[in-house]
Amino acid sequence: MTDNLLAGVMVFIGLFLGGGVFSLAKQGLKIGAAICAVGAVMAITAGVLWW
């Protein structure tokens, strides 16, 4: 059960960072959005692989 909880947290963090990508892109901060996007992809990938 703990593994599934941690995987869910990682996916949640990835989705949170995905919202940050959208917000930063709307503000015109492309470098920040790109860094945030890399973090989001890594977090979601880690959550899916952990599951």
Image: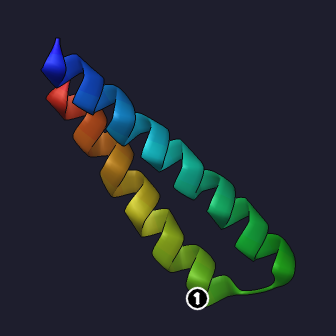
Q: Quadrant of residue 19?
A: bottom right
What secondary structure is found at the residue carrying circle 1?
Answer: helix
Q: Which residue has dot 1 on it?
A: 31
Q: Quadrant of the C terminus?
A: top left
Q: Quadrant of the N terminus?
A: top left
- In x, y percent, where is residue 37? 51, 65
The amino acid beneath tag 1 is Ile
Say which residue appears at 27% left-offset and 23% top-offset. Answer: 5
Nearer-the-camera pick, 1 or 19:
1
Say which residue appears at 84% left-offset and 80% top-offset. Answer: 27
Q: Residues within 10 Å of mark 1 (few under 14, many from 20)?
A: few
- In x, y percent, where is residue 36? 51, 70
The single residue placed furthest to the front in the displayed view is: 2
- In x, y percent, where is residue 4? 23, 18
Residue 35 lies left or right of residue 20; in this view the side is: left
Residue 50 lies left or right of residue 37; in this view the side is: left
24 vs 29: above or below: above
38 vs 43: above or below: below
